[in-house]
Image (tube, rainbow, N blue to C red):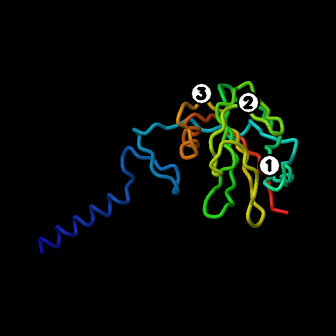
Amino acid sequence: MRIQYTLLFIITVLLITSCVKNPGQELQDETQKPILETEEVQAPVEVTGMQIISDNFKNRGDIPLEFTCQGKDISPHLAWTEIPQGTRSFALSITDPDAYGRTWVHWLVMNIPANVTEFPKGAHAGIQVPNDFVKPGYGGPCPPTGKHRYFFTLYALDVEELGTGVNLLNFFDKVDTHMIAKAELVGMYQKK
C-alpha cells in the first residue's frame, strides 16, 4: 500500500512539473525553441520602411528573359530606399524557395557600402559569395519545371564588413547576427 502511494506521488509530481513552464524560460511561439534568460536576445528586425525595387520588373511580376539562364543571365537593376539609421553596409541574396528539395541560392553579395543604394543592370558593388551554382556571381532563374518565385532580399547591417570566411553555409547566419532591417522584392519566372 505504501509503495502504491509513493508511486502515485511520484507520478503526480512528474505530471505537474511537465505542465509548468520552467523558470527562466519564455516561449516565443509554438514553432520556436524556448529562449533561455542566458541567451542573447537580438533586437527586432525592422519590417517596414526600407524598400527594394527594380526598373526591370514589378514585385510579384515576371522576370524578363534577359535576366535568366535562357537570356543573357545578367543581374537586373535593383535600387533601395528608406535606409534605416545605423546602417553601415548592406548584403543581398536571391533565393528560390520553390526549387526541388530545398531553397536554391542564386546570388549572395556582402559588404555593400552604406552609400550604395542602387545596382545598375549587370553590375554590383561589394563582395560576391559563391552560390549554389558553386561560383561567385549572379545565377539567373532557371527552373526545370513550373513557375518559381525568386526572392531578392536586401539586408541593412550594423557593420561595415561581415568578416572573413563567409560562404554559402554561414552567410545567412552572419547576416542575421548584424541585420537591423530587410526588404524583399519577389520576381516570378517559368522557362519559355
Name which quarter of the figure residue 98 lies in: bottom right
Q: Position of residue 47 (x, y in %)?
A: 68, 41
> Depth check: 53 or 165 in front?
165
Nearest to the eye among marks 3 and 2: give it: 3
Query: Closer to us: mark 1 or mark 3?
Result: 1
- Tell me if residue 116 comes above or below residue 146 in the rendering: above
Image quadrant where residue 162 sits:
top right
Would you name the residue on which mark 2 appears? 83
Q: Which residue is mark 3?
A: 159
> Which residue is labeled 1 in the image?
73
Q: Do the residues under discs 1 and 2 have CB atoms within 8 angstroms?
A: no
User: Where residue 120 appears, x then y in whole percent?
Assistant: 83, 35
Q: Which mark lies nearer to you, 1 or 2?
A: 1
Secondary structure of the residue carrying numbered label 2 = loop
Callout 3 amino acid: Val
Q: Residue at 39% across / 38% down in the picture? A: 38
Circle 2 packing at 10 Å, graded few (<14), some (14-19), many (20+), is some
